Image: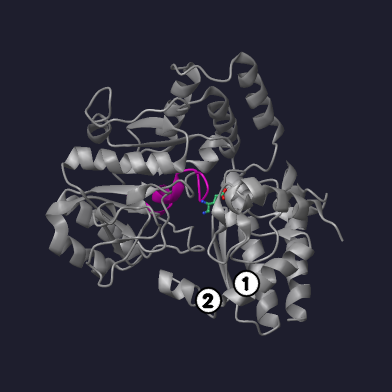
Amino acid sequence: MSSRNQDLFEQSQRIIPGGVNSPVRAFKSVGGTPLFFKRGQGAYVWDADDKRYIDYVGSWGPMIVGHSHPAVVKAVQDAAAQGLGFGAPTAAELEMAELLCQLLPSLEMVRLVSSGTEATMTAIRLARGFTGRSRIIKFEGCYHGHSDGLLVKAGSGALTFGQPSSSGVPAEIAALTTVLDYNDAAGLERAFAELGKEIAAVIVEPVAGNMNLITPKREFLEALRALCTKHGAVLILDEVMTGFRVGLQGAHGHYGIKPDLITLGKVMGGGLPAAAFGGRRDIMQCLAPLGAVYQAGTLSGNPVAVAAGLATLKLVQAPGFYQRLSQLAKHLTEGLTASARKHGIPFCAQSIGGMFGLYFSKAVPTSYNEVMAGDKAAFNRFFHAMLDEGVYLAPSAFEAGFVSAAHTDADIAQTVAAADKIFSAW
Ligand code: HOZ
């Protein structure tokens, strides 16, 4: 049977590498033909063949109030009618900066950029400029965008030089990144004992959402803060995914950990390209034009993107917003887990705020190695069976899922019933 998705994918592959503009969209991990979407409304998306899905990707996180929320669409239309961009400051940028600093007490100053990649890349440059040091630490399985120094995997021994995880990243740049195990406080302590004077920054997802979902151990968070303080390194919490997603004060508010810098994106842009980084005033004052660390962008603080972000951030401040979001995610993960248990399938799930992880393993993983040991083939089978049932999950066993305020109890019940049907025939 001919499929518009299939036709579009075939045509796209002729002129777009792999047919997609971001690799995970290509369904390589799960196999099959990627869906081309033509519409999103509330909790649902429609593909090019007009099939409707309950959406648990939410544009990879931003759609926390659901697709095409009328207040967000109106704000975007109003802003667009006034001008699409000026490359000059606007009052709306100030409003966004003030709101971010008011909602996130760790922000004394903030700068707006256009993508999470830009935010993390610049936060690292800033940390290097501030400390006068070059080395950074990141953790295996954490993803911080695609700048050269962050596309790095561990070398053969824990403290050997990092190696490029992408062709095109110079080994000399990767060598400045040390890659450690997530949730391993002792490993972090050893790294600081050996390399402490060289370390400009530690960058970490306070809840890892790019190796499925891994929550941080309390001792790991405490070690991050204490060791960065002791050795004069900048602690960068990458909250591009978790900011306004796990709660109104992000993961650092949730866990009560004080960062030196944070990075934001996704929800704060309401689905359009807006992102930010900010934190301690003494560090942020090193940025040009005040200081010597350079960063710039024609689209930084774009008025239409800022309008989408402001409208979204207004909606998430409604009383009870995160309570309801957390409940929805909890009902989903508990429902799926109960169904799998009933049918004797090794499966578990967890959630934090509006994000969740599904694992085809006996226990919830706490590290990259544990996640990698999960049954990927089982996930892929489940993913396609759920697609057939009209449920769209992230097309990879190593991505977190997202619920929105537009999801209803009936959507969650329908999703759990779909999984139950699949598990009963497993
Ligand atoms: N960086 C996202 C995965 N964690 C993918 C974004 C996209 O393909 O839109």
Q: Give the distance between the C-alpha atoms of the residues marked 2 and 1, in whole angstroms.
A: 9 Å
Q: In this view, does 157 lie above or below 262?
A: below
- Residue 408: give x, y in percent of width and height: 73, 52
- Answer yes or no: is residue 35 visible: yes
Q: In this view, does 410 lie above or below 88?
A: below
Contact (CB < 8 A) between labels 2 and 1?
Answer: yes
**Which residue is more in the foreground, 264 or 85?**
85
Secondary structure of residue under mark 2: loop
- Residue 136: give x, y in percent of width and height: 25, 52
- Answer yes or no: is residue 404 visible: no
Location of the C terminus (image quadrant): bottom right
User: Residue at coordinates 14% horizontally, 63% vertically from top-left?
Assistant: 193
User: Residue at coordinates 74% horizontally, 54% vertically from top-left?
Assistant: 54
**Residue 245 in magenta?**
yes
Few, some or many residues within 10 Å of mark 2 (<14, 14–19, 20+): many
**Residue 208 in magenta?**
no
The residues colored magenta run 244-257
Give the amino acid at mark 1: Phe
Location of the N terminus (image quadrant): bottom right
- The residue where tag 1 is placed is 379
- In-image side of 338 versus 323 (left or right): right
